[in-house]
């Protein structure tokens, strides 16, 4: 809970400044305070603690920046021109609560603000530069946004599993891999350990998307907090649609097993304590 409180405090410190446009800040707050689990930033903070790093305001600022980008992506995903959803986390989506233009601008702010926040964090200059470069790549043309474009182009088409993995490696995977990579950068680990962390993050990212696809066809609105079976109605290729539910469960568990093996190796070789991270990853499992 302390991690979520620290992230919330860092977000508030940034957005509680005198607003240029009050309505914009209201729309931003509406989405960043909507009760999300803050999985990505919490993973970053738990990894840092596992590496023996004493958390400071700067680390919470990096975590808050990551949450900003994730939240901005959800606002844009829900827009009529994208997934056209009315609900997110059990309440009206941003464009339904405000309007399309306000939601677009709130998402724009949440995509851009993190880079200034991280640039001012009290971390070594090279660490800040590396974090900004990696976050930009994970979120932009060569990551999340590029993957979103592929996802939209794939609607109504029968994709191969390879094509689907390429979409999700970019749309979901790279931003989910960032906390693993960022923790290694902040802790100034060696290049081999950072490469292991990147791979573990990519595996967790794939697992997360497979899990989301499974839940889209098996969970209720109350469980999801958003409209179920949206992918079916949009004629999107999903893992259950291409592989079936049983093989989708197998893929989810295999990805998690591989990621956990990497963390066990790091614990053994680097004398780290990553039990909390492993527990978070274990909680991503589903049992059909």
Image (spheres, rainbow, N blue to C red):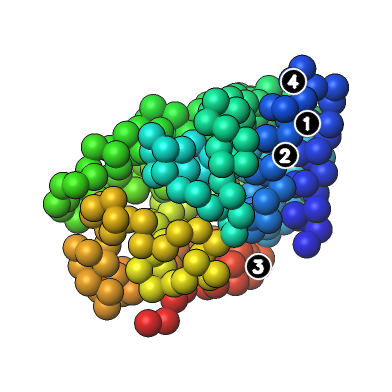
Disc 1 element: helix
What is the distance, in whole Å, between disc 1 and disc 4 at their CAs? 11 Å
Q: Position of residue 167 (x, y in %)?
A: 30, 44
Residue assigned mark 4: 21
Q: Which mark is residue 29?
A: 2
Q: Nearer the viewer, residue 72 or 6?
A: 72
Disc 3 element: helix
Q: Are marks 3 and 2 in contact (CB under 8 Å)?
A: no
Disc 4 element: loop
Mark 3 or 2, nearer chain start: 2
Quarter that holds the C terminus: bottom left
Q: Which mark is residue 276?
A: 3
Mark 1 or 3, nearer chain start: 1
Disc 2 element: helix
Q: Please report the residue visible at 19 percent of the width from the left and 56 percent of the height from the top.
A: 161
Q: Nearer the viewer, mark 1 or mark 4?
A: 4
Mark 1 or 2, nearer chain start: 1
Q: Please report the residue visible at 50 percent of the width from the left and 58 percent of the height from the top.
A: 226
Mark 2 Cα shell of 10 Å, populated few (<14), some (14-19), many (≥20): some
Q: Position of residue 232 (x, y in %)?
A: 28, 59
As displayed, is residue 86 above or below residue 68? below
Residue assigned mark 1: 15
Mark 1 Cα shell of 10 Å, populated few (<14), some (14-19), many (≥20): some
Q: Nearer the viewer, mark 1 or mark 2?
A: 2
Q: Nearer the viewer, mark 1 or mark 3?
A: 1
Quarter that holds the N terminus: bottom right
What is the distance, in whole Å, between disc 1 and disc 3 at their CAs? 30 Å
Q: In the shown orientation, is residue 107 left or right of residue 56?
A: left
């Amino acid at each position: 809970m302390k991690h979520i409180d620290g992230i919330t405090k860092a977000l508030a410190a940034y957005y509680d400044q005198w607003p240029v446009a009050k309505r914009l800040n209201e729309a931003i707050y509406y989405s960043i305070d909507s009760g999300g689990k803050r999985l990505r930033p919490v993973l970053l903070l738990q990894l840092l603690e596992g590496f023996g790093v004493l958390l400071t305001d700067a680390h919470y600022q990096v975590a808050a920046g990551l949450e900003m980008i994730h939240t901005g992506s959800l606002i844009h995903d829900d827009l009529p021109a994208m997934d056209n959803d009315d609900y997110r986390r059990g309440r009206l989506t941003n464009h339904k609560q405000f309007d399309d233009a306000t939601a677009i601008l709130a998402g724009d702010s949440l995509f851009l603000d993190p880079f200034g926040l991280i640039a001012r964090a009290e971390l070594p200059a090279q660490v800040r530069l590396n974090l900004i470069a990696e976050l930009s790549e994970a979120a932009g043309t060569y990551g999340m946004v590029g993957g979103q474009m592929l996802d939209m182009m794939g609607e109504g088409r029968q994709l191969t599993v390879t094509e689907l993995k390429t979409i999700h490696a970019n749309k979901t995977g790279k931003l989910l891999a960032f906390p693993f990579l960022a923790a290694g950068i902040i802790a100034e680990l060696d290049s081999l350990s950072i490469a292991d962390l990147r791979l573990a993050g990519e595996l967790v990212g794939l697992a997360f998307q497979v899990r989301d696809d499974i839940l889209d066809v098996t969970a209720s609105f109350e469980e999801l907090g958003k409209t179920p079976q949206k992918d079916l109605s949009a004629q999107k290729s999903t893992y259950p649609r291409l592989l079936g539910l049983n093989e989708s469960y197998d893929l989810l568990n295999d990805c998690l097993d591989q990621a956990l093996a990497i963390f066990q190796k790091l614990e053994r070789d680097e004398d780290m304590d990553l039990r909390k991270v492993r527990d978070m990853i274990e909680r991503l499992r589903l049992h059909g």
